Amino acid sequence: MLQVTNLTKTFKDTVAVDNISFNVEPGKIFGLLGPNGAGKTTTIRMILNIIRPSAGTILFEGKSFTKEFFNYVGYLPEERGLYKKSKVLDTILYFASLKNMDKKSAVDESIKWLKKLEIENYKGKKIEELSKGNQQKVQFIASVVHNPKLLIFDEPFSGFDPIIQQIIKEILLSFVNSGKIIILSTHQMDTAEKLCSDIFLINKGKEVCSGSLSQIKKQSGSNNIRIEFEGDSSVLNSSPFIAHADCYSGYAEIQLKDNILPQDFLRSIIDKVAVTQFSIIEPTLNKIFIDAIKRSSI
């Protein structure tokens, strides 16, 4: 388990991370989420010992990090950077050597990953000759080739088309099944919702909410509905029963006011629009994220 306790980082008069604590368990994807400037990257850099915390502790399996441990960490940063003039295979082997992999294992694993991501034919090409998406694949491989115990991915889907995004998602789930510790930082709430078991939402350096995603959804209330309909959506916007509504073409996702029952709302609109489907839904992670950030910014 990765244990982060009372972690704080201050830059002069700015508190970038303010006394946050969380645990990341093996075999789960932990979502470190928040808007730009929330403190996510600073937190990741402290975990990786790139910068030192002003206060707090970071433990792995109950022990402080050692130089040797960092051979078992894989990190994919949001801002990517590869040596443009280097060849693909040479680049991956260089990063593998920094993690003390022996040459044969590094070559074998590199070829395996190049095949998996369908770029084996490019192993002798220079990085600058590859498309942006294929460069991203190379950097992804460089972060996982040494079979790390702890994986930290900062926007891992950036620059990938939907097909490659799906492949990366499947790879992350395979890491879950093998018991790795995974931290995922992303702005793609729909992706985080599908992949993460636990989340930690941070804003302005402070914890906003954290815990099991399923539990957070329950705590966020069940007074949310989805309605598919034919007719004028202005009927929904003017309803006194609605706290908030997101209206789209032919359907809407609605948060009812606390004292309103779904069946009462349905009765109020049944003669105004043609309802084709009506269901009670859990709030999406995107909705939870937006509402929580609004509350924490007041």
Image (spheres, helix red, strand yellow):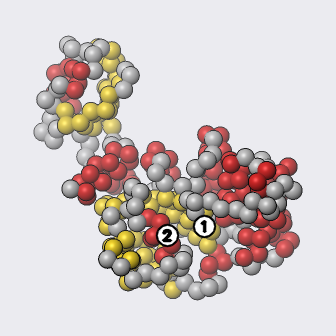
Mark 1 is on which residue type? Tyr
Please give left or right for residue 91 compared with residue 240 in the image: right
Instruction: Sort mark 1 into few (<14), some (14-19) or many (20+) by Cα contacts within 10 Å.
Output: some
Please give left or right for residue 32 compared with residue 116 in the image: left
Observer able to see residue 237? yes
Please give left or right for residue 141 compared with residue 288 in the image: right
Q: Are marks 1 and 2 in contact (CB under 8 Å)?
A: yes
Mark 2 is on which residue type? Ile
Residue at 23% x, 24% y: name it: 236
Q: Position of residue 246 (x, y in %)?
A: 31, 32
Q: Helix or strand or loop: what does disc 2 sit on? A: helix
Image quadrant assignment for residue 82: bottom right
Judge by depth and name the residue closer to the eye, 162 or 150.
162
Judge by depth and name the residue closer to the eye, 268 or 88.
88
Residue position for label 1: 75
Q: Where is residue 265 in the image (x, y as percent from the top left)?
A: 18, 27
Image quadrant assignment for residue 33: bottom left
Judge by depth and name the residue closer to the eye, 239 or 12.
12
Distance CA(mark 1)–CA(mark 2): 9 Å
Instruction: Sort mark 2 into few (<14), some (14-19) or many (20+) by Cα contacts within 10 Å.
Output: many
